[in-house]
Amino acid sequence: MRRSPLLLLLLTSLAFAVVARGDDVSRATTTSHMLSARARASSADVLALALAEREYVVALRRELHRRPELMWRERATRDVIARELAKMNIEYEFVTATGVVGIVGNGSRAVGLRADMDALPMRERSRTTYASEIDGVMHACGHDGHVAMLLGAAKVLKDIETRSSGTFPGVVRLIFQPAEEGGAGAKEMLAPSDGGRGILAMKPDIESVFGIHNWPYVEMPSGTMGTRGGTIMAGSGCFDVNITGRGGHAAVPHNNVDVIVAGSAVVTALQTLVSRLTDPLDSVVISVTVFNAGTVSNVMADTANLQGTLRALDPKTFIKFQDKITKMISAIAQAHGCTASTSFEPEWNGVKRIPYPPTVNSPRAAALATRVASEMFGAENTREVVPVMPAEDFSFFGEVYPSVMMWLGAYNVSAGATHPLHSTEYVLDENILTTGVALHVSYALEYLSNGFDAV
């Protein structure tokens, strides 16, 4: 029978009600029976265990949602994660100022599960009962949900390890990563710039990393999930341009060097990089979003500042266009008698913005994630998605390890989850939290048991 996303959610809720009910058997007894009957947990076992953690992950997610923190300031979030891991008797260590890496299992093979944890500088207008209590800061991208999913997965994995009588198949590293929203936290977690111990120094080496992002768009209703091999999300870089000319009285422009004319020429010329110097089958976006110059109407400014973004799906194109943009701006400024400097690592609000390369999924990792999802939730609810132009610093993990980012459908009218990511009215459909738990656990166990041999 074909299972629709809505029916799947209804079945999920029903299953949870049965599992959570204490009049027949406790969850601990159920888990013990599952694992004593099999060498390792099956997809059905994992899903049942994940559903049993619904109350836990919802409560935890709401706790985090009420107290959001901006990138590199996630100290209270870090402490909540550490508190929960300690309750589970899971060893952990702090990586960078606010990141956490937990560890479940032991052995010579390791897999990584990643959740981002930072919020955005936005005033929430969702009107939920658990809305942000921090004025001007909001979890508008669902990272609170991502953290809750991974902590739920940690709980299930530790339970399975405890009951596995020494047969747990390897090491799971639980990566709680700060500063995804522009701070390149993934890159710092791999090799901290302060010289501290990062993920690359941990043994055994991670062999694959799995990540989830909620996707609240109409083409991905709750109960569905999707990924693809190859590029799934664009690379993104912020550029900051300073043009210097010679200011003076607006009545005698011939005695001055006009930075506004030069800057305007830059804005229009940059679009020709896309329309005339890009393969039509390639995907590139250049947007100038800030143009500041001058303060009064009768004075020509000495300097102008432009800011914008570059996005591209192909890694080579992304690198090439950073150089093209820099050279074009310098040439145009010079043609207008000005000088220009361009940076793709500007510092905004005290944080250095490092370009994110495109997120490129390993085809084998994507195939494994798809198979795991299909086995638990049905092939009809698992799909191959198309690449999009938003960026993700999960890309840094993909440059080091065979990795996969999977989108978890989160569009649900009845839950009020119809607003896009980064909206002040964004609402996360909490029905998907246990789905994320199950996907994390299943990917980790399947990879540790069989690697990519079965795909």
Image: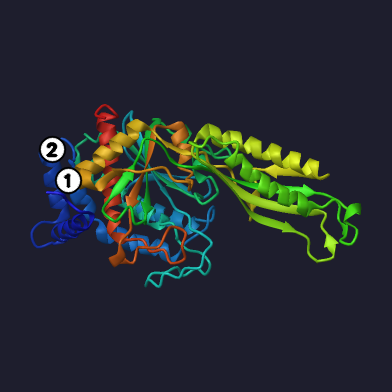
**Which residue matches tag 1?**
45
Image color mode? rainbow
Q: Nearer the viewer, residue 39 or 162?
A: 39
Task: Determine the residue located farthest toward the left in the rendered image.
Answer: 24
Q: Position of residue 74 (x, y in %)?
A: 50, 56
In the rendered view, would you say 229 is above or below 220? above
Q: Residue at x 21, y 43 (%)?
A: 379
Quadrant location of the C terminus?
Answer: top left
**Which residue matches tag 2?**
38
Q: Nearer the viewer, residue 419 or 324?
A: 324
Q: Secondary structure at mark 2?
A: loop
From the viewer's perspective, is 449 left or right of 418?
left
Q: Residue at x 15, y 42 (%)?
A: 35
Q: Position of residue 11 (x, y in %)?
A: 16, 57
From the viewer's perspective, is 132 left or right of 344?
left
* Mark 1 neighbour class, 10 Å CA radius: few under 14, some 14 to 19, many 20 or more: many
Residue type beneath disc 1: Asp
Q: Secondary structure at mark 1?
A: helix
Residues tagged 1 and 2 counted as in contact (Cβ below 8 A): yes
* Mark 2 neighbour class, 10 Å CA radius: few under 14, some 14 to 19, many 20 or more: few
- Mark 1 or mark 2, which is nearer to you? 1
From the viewer's perspective, is 448 left or right of 123?
left
> Reading the chain from its start, which is encountered first: label 1 or label 2?
2
Q: Residue at x 34, y 42 (%)?
A: 227
